[in-house]
Image: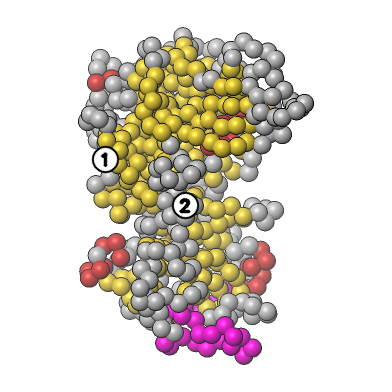
């Protein structure tokens, strides 16, 4: 897949291991889950302690209680602004507790679980400060950001590590850790914030690497197909195979133009489909007369017999630089592929856009085609749709893609291909600019995982902020109760894929300017690297045939043994 297309689409319980030699003095935050009442927390303006036995299990993250901020907000009991700040008025509703930050603490991490629902109306400010009205003009403290009303529903972890400048302002001080509504809520407002399991830790408590589990020590039976960049040229990517512990690395297919992406094992494990970057028209050498394109290629499990079965097309625009009116290149490129349960058909998403001589990109339409794996015959399956994943339940998960927004609502849908005509269902909705993406079915055909933007940020060594993402697990039979599996504050993430038994997810981790493949234990939240070369991405796990416990068997597995040591072909 051409790098332009890759860039366009690049787009719990956690193992929190404090780094050696950090905090020497503990930070005490009492009653973090509100299980022993409210005290020593204080609430005002109508904030309440919510009981899961009354309000339902979703009302809390853990235990029985959480704090709820919602309508109507009254300002009753809220502290007055300090002298000179009377113009700010009384805070409309709040939750706070005093916390003492040791003078010798080497780092401070603040975390809590939040839940947001209802129509957006106001933000929830969160900060460490000496008063309820933030740390303006010499009050000191640290702004921890806001819980936005546009964040997606479900209990999610917010975790923030103070920057060095912020740390210097809080060391040795007793401050309020406060959650404060920015604007009041009226009786007709439906917005609700809930807060639970608040922690302040004297350490840099971001996600860290755990040791590789014994179950992932490779034996060759369920290898990973993945993409690896050339260290000297990031445009040169090739298909490789390795064991689940990163060993036994072998080149399988170099690609027509040394630019491949998104490999996917067939359900039988006999073949791998991938996207191969090329040009259209094929063989044209004049850059004014061709455009970037892609082919859908199928190779054998050992990398042999590569066979293109589908080719995107395009229309070259004006020569560059244009002499009169400029006509842009019209480019179409494959972005994702997924096998049907019987391995006879592939679903492939295609993105179409215009490109000008300046490099400016314009527009963008996405569609999903159904492509016969033997003949390459294709039919239009869905418009305004991308990132298909075909489950063992014969349902196609996909992501809405509609720039206009009037043709298909975001964010995650499925298409039931077991009925005629196939039936579409919107599973998840977006909120503002936030949407779940990269959906992948669990092998059981009932659960699925997505990548989601969260409310917290991380900063690099240069002070640049990046929004943290999360891996979220959904039960299609209970979409209102998703579970956060991982808060990715150790880098950006993309392209999750399940292990054949559904025990692990693997994902691409983007850190600094490098990419690696990491594993995640779904039950414990432990995570760690499979590769450390900074060049690896887009991993996909060879299925187990016949299925292991908990894995639905499908017709593609007929006659295929569970353990298959693949011949190695160096190409």
Place residue 46 in its image quadrant: bottom left
Place residue 57 in its image quadrant: bottom left
Q: CA distance from mark 1 to mark 2?
A: 24 Å
Please report the residue visible at 44 percent of the width from the left and 84 percent of the height from the top: 75
Q: Is residue 391 left or right of residue 294?
A: left
| Residue 525 seen anywhere in this rendered image of the structure | no
Q: Is residue 69 above or below residue 335?
A: below
Neighbourhood count class around disc 2 (C-alpha, 10 Å): few under 14, some 14–19, many 20 upward: some
| Residue 431 seen anywhere in this rendered image of the structure | yes
Q: Is residue 165 left or right of residue 370?
A: right
Q: Which element is circle 2 on?
A: loop
Q: Which element is circle 1 on?
A: loop
Q: Is residue 83 magenta?
A: yes
Please report the residue visible at 43 percent of the width from the left and 45 percent of the height from the top: 406
Name the residue that disc number 2 marks.
434
Judged by depth in the image, the label closer to the viewer, 1 or 2, is: 2
Question: Magenta residues, as a range?
Answer: 76-101
Residue 413, position in %: x, y? 35, 41
Q: How many marks?
A: 2
Q: Which mark is residue 446?
A: 1
Q: Residue furthest bottom?
A: 83
Identify the coloring.
secondary structure
Q: Is residue 38 left or right of residue 460?
A: left
By secondary structure, the bulk of the magenta-drawn segment is best described as loop
Of the pair 487 and 340, the residue shown nearer to us: 340
Where's the N terminus, which quadrant? top right
């Amino acid at each position: 897949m051409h790098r332009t297309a890759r860039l366009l689409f690049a787009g719990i319980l956690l193992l929190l291991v404090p780094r050696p030699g950090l905090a020497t003095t503990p930070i005490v935050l009492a009653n973090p889950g509100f299980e022993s009442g409210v005290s020593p927390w204080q609430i005002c303006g109508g904030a309440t302690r919510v009981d899961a036995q009354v309000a339902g299990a979703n009302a809390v993250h853990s235990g029985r209680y959480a704090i709820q901020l919602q309508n109507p907000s009254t300002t009753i009991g809220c502290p007055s602004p300090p002298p000179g700040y009377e113009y700010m008025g009384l805070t409309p509703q709040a939750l706070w507790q005093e916390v003492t930050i040791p003078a010798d603490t080497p780092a401070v991490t603040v975390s809590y679980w939040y839940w947001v629902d209802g129509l957006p109306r106001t933000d929830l400010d969160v900060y460490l400060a000496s008063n309820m009205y933030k740390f303006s003009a010499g009050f000191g403290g640290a702004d921890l950001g806001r819980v936005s009303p546009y964040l997606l529903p479900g209990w999610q972890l917010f975790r923030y590590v103070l920057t060095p400048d912020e740390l210097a302002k809080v060391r040795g001080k007793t401050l309020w850790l406060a959650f404060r509504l920015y604007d009041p809520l009226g009786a007709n407002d439906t917005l609700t914030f809930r807060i639970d399991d608040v922690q302040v830790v004297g350490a840099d408590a971001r996600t860290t690497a755990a040791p590789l589990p014994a179950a992932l020590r490779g034996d060759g039976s369920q290898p990973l197909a993945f993409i690896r960049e050339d260290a000297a040229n990031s445009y040169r990517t090739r298909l490789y195979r390795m064991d689940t512990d990163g060993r036994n690395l072998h080149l399988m297919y170099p690609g027509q133009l040394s630019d491949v992406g998104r490999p996917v094992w067939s359900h039988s494990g006999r073949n791998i489909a991938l996207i191969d970057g090329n040009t259209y028209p094929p063989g044209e050498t004049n850059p004014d007369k061709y455009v970037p394109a892609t082919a859908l290629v199928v190779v054998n499990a050992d990398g042999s017999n590569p066979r293109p079965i589908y080719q995107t097309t395009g229309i070259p625009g004006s020569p560059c630089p244009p002499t009169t009116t400029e006509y842009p290149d019209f480019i179409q490129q494959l972005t994702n592929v997924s096998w049907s349960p019987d391995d006879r058909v592939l679903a492939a998403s295609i993105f179409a856009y215009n490109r000008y001589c300046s490099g400016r990109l314009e527009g963008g339409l996405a569609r999903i085609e159904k492509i016969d794996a033997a003949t390459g015959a294709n039919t239009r399956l869905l418009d305004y749709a991308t990132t298909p994943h075909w489950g063992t339940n014969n349902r196609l998960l996909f992501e809405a893609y509609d720039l206009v927004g009037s043709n298909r609502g975001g964010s995650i849908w499925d298409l039931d291909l077991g009925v005629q005509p196939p039936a579409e269902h919107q599973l998840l909705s977006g909120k503002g600019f936030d949407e779940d993406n990269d959906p992948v079915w669990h092998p059981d055909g009932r659960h699925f995982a997505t990548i989601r933007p969260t409310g917290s940020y991380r900063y690099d060594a240069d002070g640049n902020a990046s929004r943290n993402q999360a891996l979220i697990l959904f039960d299609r039979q209970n979409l209102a109760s998703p579970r956060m599996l991982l808060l990715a504050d150790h880098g950006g993430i993309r392209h999750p894929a399940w292990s054949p038994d559904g025990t692990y997810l693997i994902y691409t981790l983007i850190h600094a300017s490098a990419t690696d493949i990491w594993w995640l234990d779904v039950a414990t939240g432990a995570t760690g690297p499979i590769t450390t070369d900074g060049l690896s991405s887009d991993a996909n796990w060879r299925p187990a045939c016949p299925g292991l416990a908990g894995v639905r068997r499908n017709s593609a597995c007929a006659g295929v043994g569970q353990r298959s040591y693949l011949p190695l072909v160096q190409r």
